[in-house]
């Protein structure tokens, strides 16, 4: 039984400098705070004790910055005139304390709810008029 272990080398995107060179098996904490928001690739190069190499690439998305919510327009929309937009940006901030103010995105009342309310009140008015005579 050989005591030699395989080595893995970790790269982010197309960087030539590895972020870590480790012996297997290993648990590794990838700190994404140092990466820009967007798509990245983790490249893992393994080398066996005999010198054979294997490569695996894992794509992932980083979103450490504030989340941005936009209501009033969607991706690839065709629009004209003046468009009312509601935009909110909120961050995780200090994760040791939770602040309610600004952590939720306000939204307008959906049109299906207005239709449901008008239908209900119309039915209620009809019921009152037809079943109660003074």
Image (tube, rainbow, N blue to C red):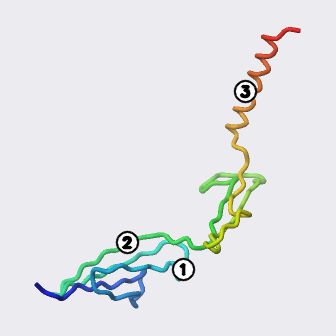
Question: How many neighbours does mark 1 have within 10 angstroms: few (below 14), some (14-19), or many (20 or more)?
Answer: few
Query: Is residue 76 shown left or right of residue 32?
Result: right
Secondary structure under the numbered disc 2 in the rendered image: strand
The residue beneath circle 1 is 33
- The quadrant in which residue 73 appears is bottom right
- The quadrant in which residue 124 appears is top right
Question: How many neighbours does mark 2 have within 10 angstroms: few (below 14), some (14-19), or many (20 or more)?
Answer: few
Can you give x and y, in whole percent of width and height, for residue 53 in the image?
22, 82
Q: Residue at 39% of width from left, 80% of height from top?
A: 28
Q: Earlier in the sequence, mark 2 or mark 3?
A: 2
Label 2 vs label 3: CA separation? 52 Å
How many numbered callouts? 3
Can you give x and y, in whole percent of width and height, for residue 111 in the image?
70, 40
Can you give x and y, in whole percent of width and height, for residue 59 in the image?
41, 70
Secondary structure under the numbered disc 3 in the rendered image: helix
Question: How many neighbours does mark 3 have within 10 angstroms: few (below 14), some (14-19), or many (20 or more)?
Answer: few
Q: Earlier in the sequence, mark 3 or mark 1?
A: 1
Disc 1 and disc 2 in contact, CB within 8 angstroms: no
The residue beneath circle 3 is 120
Query: Is residue 77 shown left or right of residue 38?
Result: right
Closer to us: mark 1 or mark 2? 1
The residue beneath circle 2 is 58
In the image as oriented, which residue stretches furthest toward the right?
A: 134
Q: Residue at 32% of width from left, 87% of height from top?
A: 22
């Amino acid at each position: 039984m050989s005591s030699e272990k395989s080595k893995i080398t970790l790269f982010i995107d197309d960087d030539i400098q590895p972020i870590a060179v480790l012996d297997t098996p290993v648990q590794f904490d990838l700190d994404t705070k140092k990466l820009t928001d967007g798509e990245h690739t983790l490249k893992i190069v393994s080398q066996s004790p005999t010198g054979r190499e294997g490569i695996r690439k894992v794509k992932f998305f980083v979103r450490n910055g504030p989340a941005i919510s936009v209501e009033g327009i969607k991706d690839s929309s065709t629009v004209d005139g003046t468009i009312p937009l509601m935009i909110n940006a909120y961050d995780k901030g200090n994760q040791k304390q939770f602040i309610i103010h600004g952590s939720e995105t306000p939204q307008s009342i959906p049109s299906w709810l207005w239709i449901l309310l008008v239908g209900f009140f119309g039915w209620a008015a009809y019921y009152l008029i037809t079943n109660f005579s003074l």
